[in-house]
Amino acid sequence: MLNRYKVYKETGFEWIGKIPRDWEIFRISKFFNERSEKVDDVVYPPLSVTMSGIVEQLSDVAKTNDGDNRKLVKKDDFVINSRSDRKGSSGIAPRDGSVSLINIVLEPHGLDPHFIQHLFKSYYFKEEYFRNGKGIHWDLWTTRWDQFKNINIPIPTIKEQKLISRYLDKKIEQIDKLIEKIQLKICLLDEKQTSLIKQYVVEDFVSNVGINYNNSEIRKKKIKYLFKIRKGVMPQILNNGIEKDNFPYLSMNVLRGGRPTEFTKIDNCVFVSKGDIGILWDGSNAGEILKMNLDGVLSSTAALLTITDPNLNQNFAFYVLKSYENLIKFNTNGMGIPHVDGNYLKNIEVYLPSIDIQKKVVNNLDRKLSKLTKLRSYHFDKFLLLKEYCQSLISSTVTGKVRITEDMV
């Protein structure tokens, strides 16, 4: 049974809820001073602000020639990315350095920095941080210091802050190790799946369906003549709750098997149906080919691939695109955030047999991939449960719903 505090009090803030009687509510500005000094990346070597924290500049990020136009970061400063498409990218600086101007750099005082790092990475705080921002569209949303500093947060005593951060450091490390093992299993299954698909749709029609590439029933055609590519556009406001004319918002997490938590109207958006083919267009997973797992509104980080050739079976089309996934990923471009190279994608030339052969390939592949798909789904469900458990643990602990004692650390 979870430990709880004896007496709680109302805060008046929905994302926080009730807190222990001895905890207080303060504005963020009480504990931080903004650091906005501009420096160069020679005297102050660059750092990257990631979902995993503040790290040495990543080798795969785009470098600019504007090395003199960066923000100073001192060791133990807290840095958070201001943009909505980097939600959750934040952490404590491990050394003096510099970051891009898109980040908010804060000098903390009067609290345990590790406690505040966990608080700022909790799901409900990230949503509150996003809610206080401004922008034209969801993917252009920005939260600046003027909005950020007025957010109210729950603060226990310094002793409790340190106890909570020690506990969460320990538990998150254990969960991360389990997640890493599951991710490795998923990657291995994905490699097996891709290899099998390539064997059927690219490398060896002869042994698998009794047809070779010289047969008159086989054509070669570029992707741009087979599909229309349409990117998602998010409206400014997301609605928290299902309404009659609202549809699930298909974020990257949902497209990869997660459950939708946000809903929106289809105005100015790309509506997709279950079974449609999509491609993640932006971000670290750019180039990943996906089948839509439910009806909904497409994320702005993805694109819909609509078949325009009547002689192309939808399931065969998915398998063909999946067989080129690694090449599409390898050929991404972009300044900082990887993007699919649309030119490269459109000019990929694929083999297109007759509809009858396509159906035969699909039937054979479906049968062969069935066990791999079920196994991947099993491991992915475990991955999502661990992620959800971790977020629940952080949120309930940093808001005082669970009391941490010395014997738990």
Image (cartoon, rainbow, N blue to C red):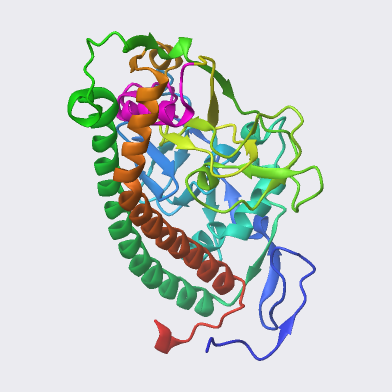
Please name whichever residue, 227 or 154, is drawn nearer the observer in this view of the structure: 227
Q: Residue at x 42, y 50 (%)?
A: 53
Count numbered badges in the picture: 0
Is residue 57 at least partly visible in the picture? no
Q: Residue at x 44, y 59 (%)?
A: 381
Q: Residue at x 43, y 64 (%)?
A: 386
- In the image, residue 379 sits, relative to residue 156, either above or below, namely above
* Quadrant location of the C terminus in the rendered image: bottom left
- In the image, residue 22 sits, relative to residue 183, either above or below, namely below
Query: In the figure, residue 17 lies in which quadrant?
Result: bottom right
Say whether residue 319 is magenta. yes
- In the image, residue 407 sits, relative to residue 67, either above or below, namely below
Query: Taking 270 as reference, is 3 left or right?
Result: left
- In the image, residue 29 sits, relative to residue 87, either above or below, namely below
Q: Position of residue 95 (x, y in %)?
A: 35, 48
Please name whichever residue, 336 or 268, is drawn nearer the observer in this view of the structure: 268
Is residue 286 at least partly visible in the picture? yes
Q: Which residues are magenta?
A: 311-340
Q: Position of residue 242 (x, y in %)?
A: 76, 52
Q: Residue furthest left?
A: 207
Q: Position of residue 257 (x, y in %)?
A: 49, 49
Query: Taking 166 as reference, is 192 left or right?
Result: left
Query: Taking 271 as reference, is 122 left or right?
Result: left
Say whether residue 341 is magenta. no
Q: Position of residue 115 (x, y in %)?
A: 50, 66
